[in-house]
Amino acid sequence: MTDARREAPAVARNRDAILAVLRGILPAYGLVLEVASGSGEHTLHFAPALPDLTFQPSDPDPEARASIDAWCAGVANIRPALALDAAAPDWPVDRADAVLCINMIHIAPWAACEGLLRGAARLLPAGAPLVLYGPFRRAGVPTAPSNEAFDADLRARDPAWGLRELEAVSAAAAAAGFGPPAVTPMPANNLTVAFRRSRGAPP
Ligand SMILES: C[S@@+](CC[C@H](N)C(=O)[O-])C[C@H]1O[C@@H](n2cnc3c(N)ncnc32)[C@H](O)[C@@H]1O
């Protein structure tokens, strides 16, 4: 029998710092939809540490979903992974109390970021968080050399990929129905960016 579990080395480096920030952002209980769960190792780390939340991992890649389910099998508060493309107009989830997306919007076309914002706005009640983690550009702030090199590498792999500017993401989030971001600097020149759903229907 083959082992579907994938290993993403960055997860071991960033999971504790992300969990520490999530403790202050996520609701006490309810459903957390994770978009772009990748290997599933973040889900496996967060769910046992936050036992009053239920985690719904997802990824459009079937091999990623197999990895998520292989890592997370038997963990009571993790549901089987869903096929979810952030850019799609319909998601296979009706509601969530929080949406989490780690290291996706720079490794996908801008349409995936816009779709993530619109999709999260459809699911979340007023005040509920959409949490992004990853490297960003910020207007007026020099980008770290390591992030410049990462951006060049991403764009060489796919011209539609690349670091996103926080101000552009925030403007798109506002258009989708979110308030201004709460930004937490993270190790290795990453940010956690938390938007909260505004009152009223998405525009
Ligand atoms: C760099 S990996 C990050 C995985 C995981 N969140 C982590 O930090 O280890 C990027 C993930 O984004 C997923 N992805 C790419 N395009 C996507 C889209 N349009 N909607 C949702 N996920 C997407 C990929 O399948 C991949 O699993």
Image (cartoon, rainbow, N blue to C red):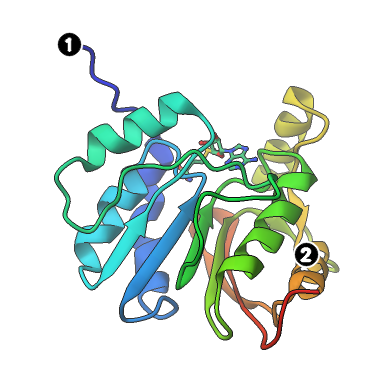
Q: Residue at x 75, y 64 (%)?
A: 166
Per the image, the residue denoted by label 2 is 138
In the foreground, 199 or 34: 199
Q: Secondary structure at mark 2?
A: loop
- Residue type at mark 2 is Arg
Q: Earlier in the sequence, mark 2 or mark 1?
A: 1
When the figure is inspected, residue 36 is found, relative to residue 77, above or below; the finding is: above
Q: Position of residue 194 (x, y in %)?
A: 58, 73
Q: The C terminus is located in which quarter?
A: bottom right
Q: What crowding class fits label 1: few (fewer than 14 Cα within 10 Å), some (14-19), or many (20 or more)?
A: few
The quarter of the displayed image where residue 72 is located? top left
In the foreground, 5 or 56: 56
Q: Secondary structure at mark 1?
A: loop
Q: Position of residue 123 (x, y in %)?
A: 57, 67
Q: Residue at x 61, y 64 (%)?
A: 120
Q: Quadrant of ligand 1?
A: top right
Q: Does residue 80 appear to the left or right of 123 in the view shown?
A: left
When the figure is inspected, residue 117 is found, relative to residue 79, above or below; the finding is: below
Residue 12, can we see it? no
- Residue type at mark 1 is Met
Residue 30, can we see it? yes
Which label sits on residue 1? Answer: 1
